[in-house]
Image (tube, grey):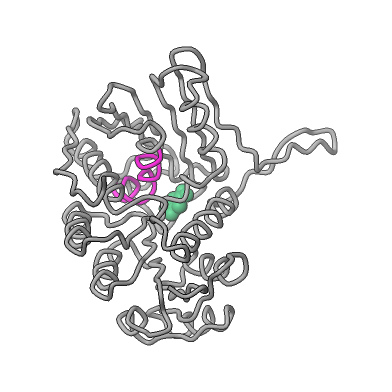
Amino acid sequence: MSDLVRVGVIGTGNIGTAHAQCLSSQIAGAVVTAVYDPDPARAHAAAQAVGARAEAQVRTLIEAGDVDAVVIASPDDLHAEQALDCLAAGKPALVEKPLAPTVSDALALVRAEAAFGRRLLTVGFMRRFDPGYQELKAQLNADLVGEALIVRNIHRNQQAPYGLLSERTMTNMAIHEMDVNRWLLGEDLALVQVLTPRPGPQTPPEQFDPMLILFRTTSGTLVEIEAFVNADYGYEVSCQVVAARGVLDMSDGSFITRTANGRRGQDIPEQWLGRFGDAYRRELQAWVGSLRGAADLVGASAWDGLAATLAAQAAVTALREGGEVTIQLPARPALYG
Ligand code: ISE
């Protein structure tokens, strides 16, 4: 690949636009050359803002001679088809999470990449690049508190993004924790059950919010996720590891405590870009860096994407049917080590 990675961006919603802008202004070694969105006016506006052209079709963007790598930031249900097109064209792609919301689509991608014989897909689980989570993992690995026994995660949105209902909350939102806890603990999630309280005033009819999603890992660590999409007051993510000899709390270094007007406190972001802007930037820089250096891809692989989707779909089954649901992974292709 040339010294400059020429990127095509599919989708100009919230995150597609943020990725295009970040790539063109903050990432060393990258340039955005093409942008696609089904809404031509939006595509043109986003392209113009980064000095790129708008492509009229996804396929022509993926196959374009001046596109070395693709960012897929389209709606979740389109990820698999577009990532398969990238594999067919032999082009690396950063696929926003989830890899795919269904197990069959995620599995098809893993099989297609394994047949291709080289890793081209990275899944945008950006929390792996967040300094807070990285520090948590470093302290666990350094054995500062002993082995993890319980991990407590909180994930709250102010208002349901994209109108998320309960099942999509698993495959689109809580899937972040399913990935980052696997990564943190270095093991798979094995069992899941879901508990729900009575509906609150913001809970949409027939839905469950918040939900407590309880996993047991293969070694027996408990992973608890509170997923609350209509938390009203703001955006919040936290993680606490209760370990054999101590406790690790991921404090949020991005918040400043301000003392003024007789009060002391912190501003809470309304949305995730405020909390994870730095993680997205670090993820994109690592991705571009690995493409330029022809080094191994960094970040979550298609296999990790499949593992997270399997966990999310098992949680959907547990929510629908009650009781504990077992998570079964297929045999791991040699490509994923
Ligand atoms: C949302 O679905 C996302 O895509 C963000 O990455 C996440 O941080 C947010 O909380 C989700 O609701």
Q: How many marks?
A: 0
* Highlighted range, magenta: 167-180
Judged left or right of residue 216, residue 268 is right
**Type of secondary structure dominating the magenta stretch:** helix
Residue 276, given in percent of the width and then of the height, sits at: 55, 50
Residue 292 position, x and y percent, is: 47, 66
Q: Which residue occupies 44% across, 44% down? A: 202
User: Which of the 4 image quadrants contains residue 150?
Assistant: top left
Q: Residue placed farthest to the right in the image?
A: 261
In the picture as drawn, the residue positioned furthest to the top comes out as 245
Residue 100, placed above or below residue 222: below
Q: Quadrant of the N terminus?
A: bottom left
Whether residue 321 is visible to the viewer of this picture, yes or no, is yes
Q: Is residue 160 visible?
A: no
Query: Is 329 in front, or is 142?
Result: 142
Residue at image point 51% right, 38% down: 133
* 25 left or right, relative to 246: right
What is the x, y in percent for residue 57? 33, 84
Residue 197, image quadrant: top left
Q: Is residue 95 magenta?
A: no
Quarter the C terminus occupies: top left
